[in-house]
Each structure stands twice: as structure tokens, then as C-alpha cells.
Amino acid sequence: METKFQELKNRLLEVNNISSAGGLLYWDQSTYMPAGGAAARARQTATLRRLAHEKFTDPAIGRLLDALAPYEKSLAYDSDEASLLRIVRRDYEDAIKVPAEFTAEVVNHTSESYQVWTEARPANDFERVRPYLEKTLEYSRQAANFFPGYDHIADPLIDSSDYGMKATDVKRVFAELRQELVPIVSAITSQEPADDSCLHQYFPEEKQLAFGLEVAQQFGYDMNRGRQDKTHHPFMTKFSLGDVRITTRAKEDFLGDALFSTLHETGHALYEQGIRMDLEGTPLAGGTSSGVHESQSRLWENIVGRSRGFWHHYYPKLQSVFPEQLGDVPLDTFYRAINKVKRSLIRTDADEVTYNLHVMLRFDFELALLEGELEIRDLPNAWRERFEADFGIVPPDDKDGVLQDVHWYFGFIGGSFQGYTLGNILGAQFFSTAVKAHPQIPSDIENGKFHTLHDWLKENLYQYGSKYTAPEIVEQATGTPLSIEPYMAYLRTKYGELYDLES
């Protein structure tokens, strides 16, 4: 059995190596590749994805899993070996339902679509990318239909990133959250918005990037196993547990973009760098779900990085980097500026209070598109109408409307956006539990010390990778299932103080 188990691990390592090479090509395309390389890059990534899929769906892996079934039953459920076999069996049974040719087609298409999007968005040219988006919708439906028996066509796509969740589950959580959020949004936006003019000055890009990266390292980001580069839409990527990279983007007329993008992606990277090294090269060496992964980016970006305590320590340092811009700006003014609540156009720039309304809008559109109730050609107008209904403002163009997010132009339609809101909820739940275990965490943050929080997260979440499902790790780490209560308590406390809201 040990020989067969090692053979399985060797085969999985080959799959991992091929997938990592494909990931490196994507990172290069998103950072340094010249536009002229797009067509060839699409072929290259499609080839690697096809090879990885073929190797993973090799019948030999199925035979090994069958032969190892008695071995798995003899092991404790939470052992590394049993967890690996359980996860690989689940992934294998899903993967063999999807033809390798389809996988290669999708990668080739999305690689081309991404390149077109990078050019179409700044040109405000939805029509240019529309044919690609229509093809993406077709592929998304095909992908779902490889898994018959679903209650909703979005279910297989949601399950692939947030295992065990269905559209009905997401809708229930969103409805509960929306009921709580809308009154808070209304109460805050009826007031005079905070003055954030201090953030809209000239801030040299190089200094912005250096400051953000310094904070990332103090959070615990290991630069011996990472690096930061610029891209159109920031992301974190991992080629191994020894090579976990972050990207950001900078605007020299706005301080917040580069800084908070860096802190956001650092949260993702801390999760990956915190996985036990002995899980390297196996399917366990990654985050357990998009929601849990996003919980870490939102925790470090917002709960830590936008807290008053954090800036009590870091604001004098930021003032010393930008003395002309911020030297005469009081801390309270800056703190209110970075936590300004306003109905806005761009999801990635949205404040903590209105952010989830952006996600809910996109999730609803995904369901409507997959169900056939909405056509791609009608999406821009539908976007404007829904945005006006939800936010009271009309996007002036498609660039800041339907073209703003990369997801639909570099992946399936369906299965990704719900993770952002689940992440907000879970981030608060993890942080609340950590503080109960270590009440000194807020004062540590105020003194620029993050090791207590980071260590708790490594011990209770990061080290396990994807050994456990999201519901299992949430219950194990926090003692309760997913709950919106810690998140709503966090928002009510923080923004109640900022905007003098009645409790």
C-alpha cells in the first residue's frame, strides 16, 4: 500500500509541475508579456492545461485510488494520507467528467479573451469583447452540464470554488446579509461623505509600492519566497510553497489603490506561505475554498489595514514618506478618508459597507446569464439599470460598468464572485475568534506587531492547506459554522463610531 501511495504522489507531483508551469505563463502574460505574444501564449497555456488534465485523468490514477481504498478506510479521517486520498478522489471523479479537449479549448479561449479585455476596457469598447464573452457563457454552460443532476446550473461552478455550496445556499446568505446591510448603507450615505481629498494628490509610484511592500513584510510576507510586480488586475499566484507572488497596481493621483491592493494580495500570500512544507506538490498544498482564501485577503486588507490602531502606528511613517502631501493632514482625517462610505462604481475600490452589494449584483447577473434570462448583448443596459436601482448612480460608460472586472474575461461566468462576500464574513469570524483567544491582538496591531495574529492563523487555518473542507475548517477554527454575526458586529462597531449611527 505504501508503494502504491507513493506512486500516486509521484503522479500528482507531475500534474502539479505542469500546472505550475502554466501558472507561470499566466503570471508573465499578466505582468511583462508584450501584447504581441497573446496568440502564442494562448496555445502554450492550452497545451499545458491539456497535458495536466490528461495526466490527472489517466486511468492509472483511478486504479491506484481503487487499490488504496482499503488503506484509506484504515486511516484516521484527519490524517494527511486519508485527507489526500479523499481530496484526490473527489477531484478525480470530477475531472474525468470533463474532456481534455474541452479544457484546452477553454484555456485557449480565455487567454485570448483576457488579452482583448486588457485593450477593450481602456477603450470603453464592449462590442469588441462581446463575442468572446458570448463564447465564455457557452463554455460555462457546457462545463456545468458535465455534472448533471444539479438543482441550478450554477451549482457545479460554485461547487468547484466553494465546495459543498449551492446557488440556494449563496442566495440565502446574501438575502440575510442584504437585509442587514441596506439600512446601514442608507443611514451612512444620507450623511455628508467624508473628505478624502488627502488621498487624491500626486504620490510617486515608486514610493507607494515600497511602502506597501514594507508593510506586507511586517505582516509576515516572506520575500525569500515571494515578490511583487504590477498588473492590470491585482492577483496572487503560487508556483510552489517556495514561490508565492503578489501583484498590485498604482495610480499616482490616488494613494489607496496600490497600498490596499498590496495588503489584499498579501493576505492571500500569507495563507499559501503558511501551508506546511511537507504538503508541497500535493493537492493539499493550497487554499481550501475561494471564500476561505478571500477571508484572509479581506482580514489583512480591511480588518487590520484599515483599522485605527494600525494607522496609529503607521501613519507617522506614511507622513514621513509623503511629507508634502500628508504632513499637515491629521490622523483622524486620514482614517475617515480611507474608510469613506460612498455609493461608487468600482467594486475593487468600494468601501467595506457597500462592497457586498457589488458582489450580489454580479452574482445575480451570473445566475440570469446561465439560466438564459439575460443575453450578453443586453448586459450593459441591464448593468446600468440594476446599478442605478442598487446604488442610485448610473455608470457613465462600460469601462467602469460591465467591463471593470477581469473574471468573466478570464474564466467561467459563475462560481467566483460569491467567494468575495463569503470571505468578508469569514474574515471577521476568524479575527473575532483569534482576539478571543489572544485579547492583546488589537494592542499588538497598534504597536505594529502582527505575529500573534499571524501565528494564530497559521496554527488554526494556514498550515492545513486544503486538508479540510471550508465548513470543516471554519467549525474547527472558530467553534461555529459560518455566521454573519461577527461580520455585522464588526461593521456596526467600526462604522457606528465613524458615522454616529444608532446601535
Image: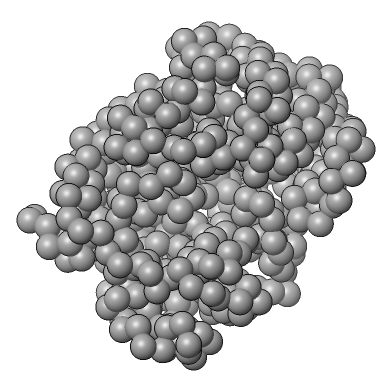
Residue 200 or residue 481, whichever sits in front: 200
Residue at left 76%, top 55%?
31
* Image quarter in which the C terminus is found: bottom left
Q: Is residue 338 above or below residue 447?
A: above
Residue 227 sits in quarter = bottom right
Q: Is residue 249 above or below residue 51?
A: below
Residue 473 or residue 295, whichever sits in front: 295
x and y, in percent, of residue 357 in the image: 35, 39
Residue 273 sits in quarter = bottom right
Residue at left 78%, top 19%?
102
Residue 253 or residue 302, whichever sits in front: 253
x and y, in percent, of residue 93 in the image: 68, 22
**Residue 470 appears in the rendering:** no
**Residue 167 appears in the rendering:** yes
x and y, in percent, of residue 277 in the image: 69, 62
Residue 161 or residue 66, whichever sits in front: 161
Count of numbered tags: 0
Residue 430 sits in quarter = bottom left
